[in-house]
Image (tube, grey):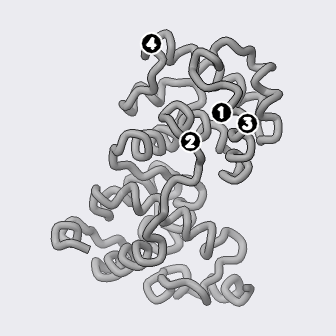
Protein backbone atom coordinates (compact mmCIF):
# COMPACT_ATOMS: atom_id res chain seq x y z
CA UNK A 1 0.00 0.00 0.00
CA UNK A 2 1.37 3.42 -0.95
CA UNK A 3 2.15 6.14 1.60
CA UNK A 4 -0.73 8.25 0.30
CA UNK A 5 -3.12 5.35 0.76
CA UNK A 6 -1.79 4.71 4.25
CA UNK A 7 -2.35 8.34 5.22
CA UNK A 8 -5.94 8.14 3.96
CA UNK A 9 -6.82 5.18 6.18
CA UNK A 10 -9.07 5.65 9.18
CA UNK A 11 -9.43 3.45 12.23
CA UNK A 12 -12.85 2.02 13.10
CA UNK A 13 -14.45 1.63 16.50
CA UNK A 14 -13.04 -1.91 16.69
CA UNK A 15 -9.91 -1.88 14.50
CA UNK A 16 -6.68 0.08 14.64
CA UNK A 17 -5.15 1.70 11.57
CA UNK A 18 -2.60 -1.11 11.39
CA UNK A 19 -5.34 -3.73 11.43
CA UNK A 20 -7.28 -1.96 8.69
CA UNK A 21 -4.14 -1.74 6.58
CA UNK A 22 -3.35 -5.43 7.09
CA UNK A 23 -6.90 -6.41 6.12
CA UNK A 24 -6.81 -4.34 2.93
CA UNK A 25 -3.35 -5.65 2.04
CA UNK A 26 -4.50 -9.21 2.72
CA UNK A 27 -7.53 -8.78 0.48
CA UNK A 28 -5.31 -7.35 -2.27
CA UNK A 29 -2.84 -10.25 -2.04
CA UNK A 30 -5.45 -13.00 -2.07
CA UNK A 31 -7.81 -11.47 -4.63
CA UNK A 32 -5.53 -9.45 -6.95
CA UNK A 33 -7.73 -9.97 -9.99
CA UNK A 34 -11.13 -9.57 -8.33
CA UNK A 35 -13.56 -7.86 -10.68
CA UNK A 36 -17.23 -7.73 -11.57
CA UNK A 37 -18.44 -11.25 -12.36
CA UNK A 38 -21.53 -10.20 -14.29
CA UNK A 39 -20.79 -10.80 -17.98
CA UNK A 40 -21.30 -7.71 -20.10
CA UNK A 41 -19.74 -5.85 -23.02
CA UNK A 42 -21.45 -2.44 -22.72
CA UNK A 43 -22.65 -0.16 -19.90
CA UNK A 44 -26.22 -1.00 -20.89
CA UNK A 45 -25.62 -4.74 -20.62
CA UNK A 46 -24.04 -4.19 -17.21
CA UNK A 47 -27.06 -2.17 -16.12
CA UNK A 48 -29.45 -4.89 -17.27
CA UNK A 49 -27.39 -7.65 -15.64
CA UNK A 50 -27.16 -5.75 -12.34
CA UNK A 51 -30.92 -5.19 -12.24
CA UNK A 52 -31.39 -8.90 -12.91
CA UNK A 53 -28.94 -9.85 -10.14
CA UNK A 54 -31.25 -8.81 -7.29
CA UNK A 55 -31.93 -11.94 -5.22
CA UNK A 56 -30.18 -14.05 -7.88
CA UNK A 57 -26.61 -15.32 -8.16
CA UNK A 58 -24.20 -13.93 -10.75
CA UNK A 59 -23.82 -17.45 -12.14
CA UNK A 60 -27.55 -17.74 -12.75
CA UNK A 61 -27.75 -14.23 -14.21
CA UNK A 62 -24.89 -14.98 -16.62
CA UNK A 63 -26.70 -18.10 -17.80
CA UNK A 64 -29.79 -16.02 -18.57
CA UNK A 65 -27.97 -13.07 -20.16
CA UNK A 66 -25.92 -15.33 -22.43
CA UNK A 67 -29.08 -15.80 -24.47
CA UNK A 68 -30.75 -12.51 -23.59
CA UNK A 69 -27.92 -10.30 -24.86
CA UNK A 70 -27.90 -12.11 -28.20
CA UNK A 71 -31.63 -11.63 -28.60
CA UNK A 72 -31.90 -7.99 -27.45
CA UNK A 73 -28.87 -5.74 -27.88
CA UNK A 74 -30.07 -2.16 -27.40
CA UNK A 75 -32.40 -0.11 -25.21
CA UNK A 76 -34.64 0.24 -28.25
CA UNK A 77 -35.04 -3.53 -28.44
CA UNK A 78 -36.10 -3.74 -24.79
CA UNK A 79 -38.36 -0.71 -25.07
CA UNK A 80 -40.28 -2.40 -27.87
CA UNK A 81 -41.18 -5.36 -25.64
CA UNK A 82 -44.02 -5.81 -23.24
CA UNK A 83 -43.09 -6.86 -19.68
CA UNK A 84 -44.82 -10.18 -20.36
CA UNK A 85 -42.64 -10.83 -23.40
CA UNK A 86 -39.41 -10.07 -21.53
CA UNK A 87 -40.53 -12.09 -18.52
CA UNK A 88 -40.45 -15.23 -20.66
CA UNK A 89 -36.75 -14.67 -21.33
CA UNK A 90 -35.80 -14.17 -17.68
CA UNK A 91 -38.24 -16.48 -15.89
CA UNK A 92 -35.38 -18.55 -14.45
CA UNK A 93 -34.55 -15.65 -12.13
CA UNK A 94 -36.21 -14.59 -8.92
CA UNK A 95 -38.70 -11.71 -9.12
CA UNK A 96 -38.63 -12.05 -12.91
CA UNK A 97 -41.98 -10.33 -13.48
CA UNK A 98 -40.98 -7.21 -11.57
CA UNK A 99 -37.57 -7.19 -13.21
CA UNK A 100 -39.13 -7.43 -16.67
CA UNK A 101 -41.43 -4.52 -15.88
CA UNK A 102 -38.53 -2.42 -14.62
CA UNK A 103 -36.26 -3.19 -17.58
CA UNK A 104 -38.86 -2.28 -20.19
CA UNK A 105 -39.62 0.99 -18.40
CA UNK A 106 -35.91 1.62 -17.84
CA UNK A 107 -35.15 1.20 -21.54
CA UNK A 108 -37.97 3.54 -22.49
CA UNK A 109 -36.69 6.20 -20.08
CA UNK A 110 -33.14 5.86 -21.39
CA UNK A 111 -34.42 6.60 -24.89
CA UNK A 112 -36.70 9.45 -23.84
CA UNK A 113 -34.32 11.26 -21.49
CA UNK A 114 -30.78 10.11 -22.28
CA UNK A 115 -30.68 9.44 -26.00
CA UNK A 116 -30.47 5.70 -25.43
CA UNK A 117 -27.24 6.01 -23.41
CA UNK A 118 -26.65 4.92 -19.83
CA UNK A 119 -26.00 8.06 -17.77
CA UNK A 120 -22.79 8.31 -15.78
CA UNK A 121 -24.34 10.33 -12.95
CA UNK A 122 -25.73 8.81 -9.76
CA UNK A 123 -28.89 10.93 -9.62
CA UNK A 124 -29.84 10.03 -13.18
CA UNK A 125 -29.12 6.34 -12.64
CA UNK A 126 -31.15 6.15 -9.44
CA UNK A 127 -34.08 7.79 -11.24
CA UNK A 128 -34.33 4.77 -13.55
CA UNK A 129 -36.91 2.09 -12.71
CA UNK A 130 -35.45 -0.78 -10.71
CA UNK A 131 -32.17 1.03 -10.01
CA UNK A 132 -31.22 1.66 -6.40
CA UNK A 133 -28.01 2.88 -4.83
CA UNK A 134 -26.24 -0.50 -5.03
CA UNK A 135 -26.98 -0.91 -8.74
CA UNK A 136 -25.95 2.67 -9.43
CA UNK A 137 -22.65 2.10 -7.61
CA UNK A 138 -21.93 -1.04 -9.63
CA UNK A 139 -22.56 0.76 -12.92
CA UNK A 140 -20.65 3.90 -11.92
CA UNK A 141 -17.57 2.01 -10.74
CA UNK A 142 -17.44 -0.80 -13.30
CA UNK A 143 -18.67 0.94 -16.44
CA UNK A 144 -17.41 4.48 -15.85
CA UNK A 145 -14.49 4.14 -13.45
CA UNK A 146 -16.10 6.29 -10.75
CA UNK A 147 -14.85 5.23 -7.29
CA UNK A 148 -17.74 3.60 -5.42
CA UNK A 149 -18.53 0.84 -2.95
CA UNK A 150 -21.63 -1.17 -3.82
CA UNK A 151 -22.85 -2.86 -0.65
CA UNK A 152 -24.49 -6.15 -1.53
CA UNK A 153 -25.19 -8.95 0.92
CA UNK A 154 -21.56 -10.16 0.78
CA UNK A 155 -19.99 -6.73 1.34
CA UNK A 156 -22.46 -6.01 4.15
CA UNK A 157 -21.71 -9.28 5.93
CA UNK A 158 -17.94 -9.40 5.45
CA UNK A 159 -17.30 -5.74 6.27
CA UNK A 160 -19.22 -6.08 9.53
CA UNK A 161 -17.52 -9.36 10.46
CA UNK A 162 -14.07 -7.97 9.79
CA UNK A 163 -14.85 -4.87 11.83
CA UNK A 164 -14.47 -2.45 8.92
CA UNK A 165 -18.04 -1.31 9.54
CA UNK A 166 -20.80 -1.76 12.10
CA UNK A 167 -23.79 -0.09 10.43
CA UNK A 168 -27.22 -1.70 10.47
CA UNK A 169 -28.09 -0.78 6.88
CA UNK A 170 -26.24 -1.09 3.55
CA UNK A 171 -26.06 2.70 3.21
CA UNK A 172 -24.59 3.06 6.71
CA UNK A 173 -21.99 0.38 5.94
CA UNK A 174 -21.16 2.10 2.65
CA UNK A 175 -20.57 5.40 4.44
CA UNK A 176 -18.33 3.72 7.02
CA UNK A 177 -16.29 1.96 4.36
CA UNK A 178 -15.85 5.18 2.40
CA UNK A 179 -14.66 6.92 5.57
CA UNK A 180 -12.23 4.10 6.43
CA UNK A 181 -10.78 3.13 3.05
CA UNK A 182 -8.82 5.38 0.65
CA UNK A 183 -11.03 6.47 -2.26
CA UNK A 184 -8.75 4.96 -4.88
CA UNK A 185 -9.29 1.54 -3.27
CA UNK A 186 -13.08 1.70 -3.02
CA UNK A 187 -13.92 -0.19 -6.20
CA UNK A 188 -11.22 -2.83 -5.83
CA UNK A 189 -12.09 -3.42 -2.17
CA UNK A 190 -15.75 -3.81 -3.08
CA UNK A 191 -14.90 -6.65 -5.49
CA UNK A 192 -12.43 -8.23 -3.06
CA UNK A 193 -14.97 -8.28 -0.23
CA UNK A 194 -17.47 -9.99 -2.54
CA UNK A 195 -14.93 -12.63 -3.53
CA UNK A 196 -13.98 -13.19 0.09
CA UNK A 197 -17.63 -13.58 1.03
CA UNK A 198 -18.22 -16.13 -1.69
CA UNK A 199 -15.04 -18.15 -1.23
CA UNK A 200 -14.42 -18.09 2.52
CA UNK A 201 -16.66 -15.86 4.63
CA UNK A 202 -19.96 -17.56 3.82
CA UNK A 203 -23.13 -16.50 5.58
CA UNK A 204 -23.88 -19.71 7.45
CA UNK A 205 -20.53 -21.50 7.67
CA UNK A 206 -17.59 -19.12 7.36
CA UNK A 207 -14.32 -20.97 6.90
CA UNK A 208 -12.39 -19.06 9.54
CA UNK A 209 -9.74 -21.79 9.67
CA UNK A 210 -8.85 -21.04 6.04
CA UNK A 211 -9.14 -17.25 6.23
CA UNK A 212 -5.99 -15.17 5.58
CA UNK A 213 -7.51 -12.28 7.54
CA UNK A 214 -8.32 -14.24 10.69
CA UNK A 215 -5.70 -12.55 12.90
CA UNK A 216 -7.35 -9.15 12.50
CA UNK A 217 -10.98 -10.21 12.08
CA UNK A 218 -13.32 -9.10 14.87
CA UNK A 219 -15.73 -11.97 14.21
CA UNK A 220 -13.05 -14.65 14.15
CA UNK A 221 -11.68 -13.44 17.46
CA UNK A 222 -15.10 -13.51 19.11
CA UNK A 223 -16.89 -16.40 20.76
CA UNK A 224 -19.51 -16.27 17.99
CA UNK A 225 -16.98 -17.57 15.46
CA UNK A 226 -16.20 -20.81 17.25
CA UNK A 227 -19.18 -22.96 16.20
CA UNK A 228 -19.19 -21.75 12.59
CA UNK A 229 -15.44 -21.97 12.04
CA UNK A 230 -15.36 -25.60 13.13
CA UNK A 231 -17.33 -26.61 10.03
CA UNK A 232 -15.43 -27.03 6.78
Residue 150's x, y, as percent? 47, 50
Give the distance between the C-alpha atoms of the residues marked 4 and 3, in whole angstroms: 28 Å
Residue 100's x, y, as percent? 72, 26
Give the distance between the C-alpha atoms of the residues marked 2 and 4, in whole angstroms: 23 Å
- Number of the front mark, 2 or 4: 2
**Residue at image mark 4:** 113
Is 23 placed left or right of 78 in the picture? left
Give the distance between the C-alpha atoms of the residues marked 2 and 3, in whole angstroms: 12 Å
**Residue at image mark 3:** 67
Mark found first going from the N terminus, 1 or 4: 1
Residue shown at the point (47%, 38%) measured from the top left: 136
Give the distance between the C-alpha atoms of the residues marked 1 and 2, in whole angstroms: 9 Å
Mark found first going from the N terminus, 4 or 3: 3
- Is there a contact, CB below 8 Å, between mark 2 and mark 3? no
Decide: few, some or many residues near mark 4? Use Cα within 10 Å; few <14, some 14-19, many ≥20: few
Residue shown at the point (52%, 31%) measured from the top left: 44
- Is there a contact, CB below 8 Å, between mark 1 and mark 2? yes
- Report helix, strand or loop for mark 3: helix
- Is there a contact, CB below 8 Å, between mark 3 and mark 1? yes
**Residue at image mark 2:** 40
- Report helix, strand or loop for mark 1: helix
Amino acid sequence: MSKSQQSALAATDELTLSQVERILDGLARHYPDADCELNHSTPFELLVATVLSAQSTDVRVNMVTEKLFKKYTTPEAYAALTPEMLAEDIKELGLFRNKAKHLVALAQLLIEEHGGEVPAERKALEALPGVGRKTANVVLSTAFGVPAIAVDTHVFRVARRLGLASGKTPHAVENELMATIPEELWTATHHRLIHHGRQICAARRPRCEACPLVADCVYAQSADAAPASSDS
